[in-house]
Amino acid sequence: MKVGIIGSGGREHALCVSLKKSSKISKIFCFPGNAGTNSLAENVNLDIKNFEKLKNFIINEKIEIVIVGPEKPLVDGIEDFLRKNKIKVFGPSKVASQLEGSKIFTKKICEKYSIPTAKFGIFESSDKAKRFLDECSHPIVVKADGLASGKGVYICEKTKESKNAVEEIFQGKFGKAENVLIEEFLEGEEMSFFIVSDGKTYKEFGTAQDHKRVLEGDKGKNTGGMGAYSPSRLETDELRKKILNKIIEPTLIALRELNTCYKGFLYAGLIIVKGEPFLIEYNVRMGDPECQTILPRLKNDFGEIINAVVTEELNSLNIDWSDDKSLCLVVCSKGYPDKYEDNVEIKNLNQINLKDNEYIFHAGTKVINSKVFSSGGRVLNFVVKSNDFKKSREKAIDLIKELNWENGFFRKDIGHKVIDK
Ligand code: AMP
Ligand code: GLY
C-alpha cells in the first residue's frame, strides 16, 4: 500500500520512520517532508494549500491513504475534500477539527456535556470584556478563538495586561476576531493525553509531557516545544479512567450528535488539579514533540493501526506499548523563537552511530547537493528510550554533543520534574 504524509516537522519524520517499518506499506510520499524523510520516502514539493493539485498527484500515484500531520489543512477541510474524491484520510473532518480550530466551539461542547474545564466567559466586544476584567481576580487567561500557531494565549497577572490582551486580539493580531475568551487560571501540572479513533471506537495512544518554554527551568518565551517525555509522570489507571469518562467520551458523543465522527489522533491538553483532569485545549493531531517520544514505545505495526482507522476496524486491534521511558531533546537554531539564521550546514550528522532505541528525527532541515542544512527554528529531535528517564536524557545529551553543531542550542533539563525531584 502507498501512503502520503502531509507536513514537514519532527512529528512527520517520526510518523515516516514508524510507517517505513510496516509490512503493509510499500511506498511513502511526504508533502513536503524534510531531510530526514528524504532518505525514507519521496519528498514532494507541491503547495499543500492547493487541495486540487494535491488530489491530482495522489490519484496519479495511486496513494491509498493520506495521513495529515499538522492542524491547518484539517481545519481548512482537507479530509472532507479528499474523502469526496474517494481518497482515504487519517485525520478528522472539518467540523470535528473545530475542536482545535475554535476554542469557543470546544468550550461550548464542554458546557453542554459537563466536561471539566476552566470556568470561562465569551465576549463579543472589547468594552464588555474589559468591564468584566475590572471585576475579576488575577491571574486570568485571555485567549483568541482561532488557530494562532501556539500564540494567542495570554496569562495575565494584572488587569492592565489582561485589558491589553483583549485589545490586541480585537485589533486582529491573530486574524479577524469576533469574540474573545476569558478563562479562569488553573494551578496544576500539564499532561498531554492521546487517543486514536476510527469514528466508531477509540483506543488510548499514550501520554507525554512537553516543555514549551525556551529556557531551562520552564522560563522564557513559549515555543513549539523544546522537548518531551513519555509516559507522563502523572499517568495512573485512576486518572486515565477519569480522563476517558469525563472528557474524551463525552466529546466523541458530542461530535456524533453534530453528525460527524472522529477519525485520527485526538490530543487532549490537560491540567491536572489535585488529581482531577481539566481540559485546556484539544488538538486534532499528534503533538510535536510528544509524537517523537510516543511512537518509539509502540509495539504494533503502525501501518496496521493507520489502516484499521481508515477502514473503521480499530476494534479488532490491541495496541501494545513498551514500558520504556522515552525522552526527546529538541535542538533549535540559536535565536529561536525570535530571529535565527537559516541555511546553516549540519556537518556531523552522518558520523553519529545510533544504536537501537536511539533516534534522530529531523524537523527544520533540507538537503542541498547531498548536504543537510537547517531550515527552521526547531531543527533536530534527539530521542532515546531506556528503562530510566535520567539515562535516556544523558544519552540524548551525549549524542547532541557528538553532533557539535555550532548554530544549535537545546534544553538540558527536559523531564526535570520526573528526573531531578
Ligand atoms: P493553549 O494554547 O490553550 O494550550 O494554551 C497554551 C498554554 O497556556 C498551555 O499549555 C498552558 O500552559 C497555559 N494555559 C492555557 N489555559 C490555561 C488556564 N486556564 N490555566 C492555566 N494555564 C493555562
Ligand atoms: N507540543 C504541543 C503541540 O504539539 O501543540
Image (cartoon, grey):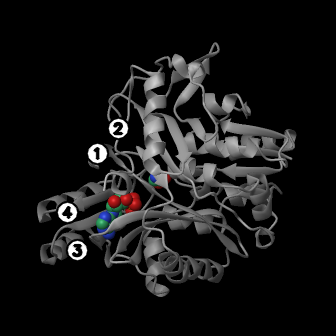
Q: Which residue is mark 3?
A: 128
Mark 4 / mark 3, whichever is N-terminal: 3
Mark 4 against mark 3, which lies toward the viewer?
4
Q: Which residue is mark 1?
A: 221
Q: CA distance from mark 2 to mark 1?
A: 7 Å
Residue at horizontal 66 percent and vertical 33 percent from the top: 37
Q: CA distance from mark 4 to mark 2?
A: 23 Å
Q: Is residue 66 visible?
A: yes
Q: Are marks 2 and 1 in contact (CB under 8 Å)?
A: yes
Residue 286 versus residue 309 in the image, above or below: above
User: In this view of the protein, which residue sits in the foreground, 416 or 53?
Assistant: 416
Callout 1, which amino acid?
Answer: Lys
Mark 3 / mark 1, whichever is N-terminal: 3
Q: CA distance from mark 4 to mark 3?
A: 13 Å
Residue at horizontal 61 percent and vertical 82 percent from the top: 253
Q: Which residue is mark 4?
A: 162
- Please tell me whether mark 2 sits on a helix, a strand or a loop: loop
Quadrant of the rendered image containing residue 281: bottom left
User: How dense is the environment of label 3, judged by Cα within 10 Å: few (below 14), some, or many (20 and up)?
Assistant: few
Q: CA distance from mark 2 to mark 3?
A: 33 Å
Horizontally, is 360 left or right of 417 in the view? right
Callout 3, which amino acid?
Answer: Lys
Mark 4 / mark 2, whichever is N-terminal: 4
Callout 4, which amino acid?
Answer: Ser
Q: Which residue is mark 2?
A: 337
